[in-house]
Amino acid sequence: MSKDLLPVTVLSGFLGSGKTTLLTHLLSHLQDQKVALIVNDMSELNIDAELVKNLHTEKTQARLVEMSNGCICCTLREDLWEQVSSLAAENAFDYLIIESTGISEPLPVAATFSFVDEKGFSLSQLSRLDTMVTVVDCLNFFANYFSAEDLWERADFGADRADERSLVDLLVDQVEFADVILLNKTDLVCAKELEDIRSLLHRLNPRAQLVECQFSRVDPSTVLHTGKYDPVLSEQSAQWTRELVSLNPAEHLPETEEYGISSFVYRARRPFHPERLWRAAQDSMEGILRIKGFFWLASHPKKIGYWSQAGGSLRLEEKGQWWADLPKSDWPAADDAWILSRWEEPHGDRRQELVVIGLEMEPGAVREMLDECLLTDQEFALGPSGWAQFPDPFPAW
């Protein structure tokens, strides 16, 4: 790790979680360092940048760059690239802090630093991601987690109506891709609720450091110069990934169930009946906090189904084609071993593979519910031509 590379911390979190409060707190404790700031806002008027500028940049060695009218994980990625390149090339700063807008996902922001342009240049040649930080509003955490709202329905988020993400989708994305999670506003929740929040966050992202705070007051060393960011580990940060890549179940030690949160992986090598699966997924599924993984649907046997459920959000959609339905000549040579590791005759890689996380959940009952969605022996014997005749309430894939 070169000392010449400009270290970068990215701050993510919902509007009102305390990101700007954290930023101003850090600046007040870093007056002996030259800090560059990039503050992003969805609206034309960048209130956060204005606040930071008024409070600190005139009194410290910080330089502020405003990025408005867009989200740096999508429309402003080119601007982010240019701004980081320019700041890093000056070789005049000890640190760069990026405050994302409240609807920004941290993963694509991080990916911007690894992208290589047509000239072979990458931001990683001038800078290095040091820490991905997500600030969580404890007071509103469960209200947001169990909300069925889409982002565009929340006027305070400033999302476009074309944005199809739900509130909980964004919350989970921000939590799962973090090295440090700040549990802010702990003084506004009771001890039991705080422990429940900690337990769920740990399940969603078991490798992240959880830090409790009030008014975003933390030691700067908690979020700066930590060296915690690792691109390989970040890809494995989510709980379902750890579960799915576990090759030796005997080595998997279950985490404490002190707060009633547990998880398991559901696997099967037979397709789901579309009508039964749709009906089951629409039920309350009491006790289930999170489902994510792949499924094989009889009415679309060549398509990979993708199930993502968290709180009030449910997505059952198509995510490509099973390798078993493609000629081997179309397989990427570098991925042969990876594909074959998921292979089982006679169905190839077609399978059900779902991670289920629940609160006071009865795994046996959930397994039984999912098993009942599988085709019976008689239904399975009909083959794909017969499966195509099943009632299918799913939207067109």
Image (spheres, rainbow, N blue to C red):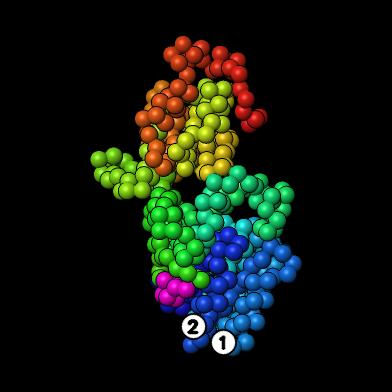
Question: What residue do we see at 55% from left, 77% from top?
Answer: 24
Quadrant of the rendered image containing residue 36: bottom right
Magenta span includes 223 = yes
The residue at which mark 1 appears reads as 60
Question: What residue do we see at 59% from left, 64% from top?
Answer: 16
Q: Secondary structure at mark 1?
A: loop
Question: What residue do we see at 53% from left, 44% from top?
Answer: 311
Residue 367 percent location from the top left of the image: 40, 29
Quadrant of the rendered image containing residue 63: bottom right
The one of 32 and 195 positioned closer to us in this rendering: 195
The one of 381 and 181 positioned closer to us in this rendering: 181
Residue neighbourhood size for the residue with mark 2, other residues' Cα within 10 Å, grouped as few (<14), some (14–19), many (≥20): some
* Principal secondary structure, stretch drawn in magenta: loop
The residue at which mark 2 appears reads as 30
Q: Amino acid at mark 1?
A: Thr
**Between marks 1 and 2, how big is the CA–CA gap?**
8 Å
Magenta span includes 149 = no
